[in-house]
Image (tube, coloured by chain):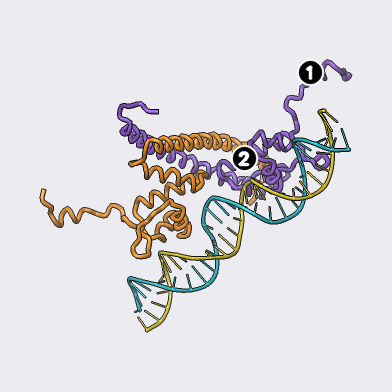
Chain colours: A purple, B orange, C cyan, D yellow
DNA sequence: GTAGCACTTTACGTTAACGTAACCCTGGGC
DNA sequence: GCCCAGGGTTACGTTAACGTAAAGTGCTAC
């Protein structure tokens, strides 16, 4: 089929804007540009450049998202990098590297399990403290409704 | 009932040894004495003293346990102290303090929810990465069994 | 052309959470 | 008597993860 110009072209919407400036990304994830540059310096991101300016693709955005998620779960940037870099090196990785990666993954997984248990326990603690607090509060305001 | 001496006394086993030295506690939780002293300095523990030496009761042990659990979940010592101290001040706390405590608890709870979601997502990521790694590994060792 | 952003680099500052080193004290075993 | 393991204090060191300040670049609006 010979390429037709306008009709099909017009419909080819850029599904998702492909590139982001550092400020955009920063606003998206509620971090500062400094943080994003720092993550690059730590080897967690490797955006392209146009001149001096960093250009972030969607894969960079995803990487940042995963990084921040890891952080919320208490992983250090070094740990996160360890997984991310090995993931990138996977296609041409040798057997030893891959096995090492599997080990790391198992490790992270175990960590998640412990956290799940911790969360369950913490949840109960919170329940207890809350109900006690409500009791005391109720005894302080027997029938009155103050505000 | 008049107190009888030996029979019942003999059975009153010290269910749990009541006091601990700092080194014992440290070994129990896989931390250093330095860490425990630091937590005290930060207002998270307040052991008794016999002379200069710290004596920890079971309630201190529990507090340490809760503190370490909080840490594993990524809470700062300041956050942990905030809850722990308000919990202690509860009995004679006023309504405003109690309501503030409830706010904090709701906050922590929301935090836990986010972490649960993060864990679920992270779990899937790990699944994906692992299966990919296994695929590549399988393609590297087609039928042979190396070690 | 210049004002004003948004971006860049370099470099020093800061905070949390301990580690480490130096020194002292004390009770129990030999 | 001496030794030494375990406890104590004081104080400086360290690491991670950024914050902040200074100073330069480039484009767009007016």
- For label 2, the crowd category at 10 Å Cα-Cα, with few meaning under 14, some 14 to 19 and many 20 or more, is some
Q: Quadrant of the N terminus of chain A?
A: top right
> Is disc 1 in contact with disc 2, using a CB cutoff of under 8 Å?
no
Residue A49 coordinates in the image, percent (x, y)? 80, 41
In which quarter of the view is residue B87 placed?
Answer: top left
Q: Look at the numbered disc 2 and give the secondary structure of its residue.
A: helix
Q: Is residue B5 left or right of residue B19?
A: left
Residue A77 coordinates in the image, percent (x, y)? 63, 47
The answer to whether any part of residue B30 appears in the image is: no
Q: Is residue B60 left or right of residue A71?
A: left
In this view, the residue in front, B9 or B90, is B90
In this view, the residue in front, B35 or B12, is B35
Q: Quadrant of the C terminus of chain A?
A: top left
Residue that extends furthest to the left in the rendered view of this protein: B2
In this view, the residue in front, A147 or A65, is A147
Residue B102 coordinates in the image, percent (x, y)? 42, 35
Asked if residue C25 is positioned above or below residue B93 in the image, the reply reads: below
Q: Which mark is first along the chain, 2 or 1? A: 1
Residue B39 coordinates in the image, percent (x, y)? 46, 54
For the residues labelled 1 and 2, the Cα–Cα distance comes to: 35 Å
* Residue for point 67% across, 49% down: A97
Chain letter of the residue beneath label 1 in the structure image: A
The answer to whether any part of residue A145 appears in the image is: yes
Counting labels gives 2
Q: Is residue A50 left or right of residue C29?
A: right
Q: Look at the numbered disc 1 and give the secondary structure of its residue.
A: helix
Which residue has dot 1 on it?
A11
Which residue has dot 2 on it?
A68
Residue that extends furthest to the top in the rendered view of this protein: A7
């Amino acid at each position: 089929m010979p390429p037709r110009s306008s009709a099909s072209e017009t419909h080819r919407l850029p599904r998702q804007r492909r590139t982001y400036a550092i400020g955009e990304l920063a606003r998206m994830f509620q971090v500062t540009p400094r943080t994003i540059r720092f993550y690059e310096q730590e080897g967690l991101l490797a955006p392209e450049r146009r001149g001096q300016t960093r250009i972030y693709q969607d894969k960079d955005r995803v990487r940042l998202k995963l990084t921040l998620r890891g952080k919320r779960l208490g992983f250090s940037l070094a740990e996160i990098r360890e997984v991310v870099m090995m993931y990138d090196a996977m296609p041409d990785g040798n057997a030893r590297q891959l096995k090492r990666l599997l080990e790391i993954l198992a490790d992270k997984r175990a960590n998640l399990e412990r956290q799940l248990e911790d969360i369950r326990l913490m949840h109960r603690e919170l329940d207890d403290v809350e109900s006690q607090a409500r009791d005391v509060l109720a005894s302080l305001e027997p029938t009155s409704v103050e505000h």
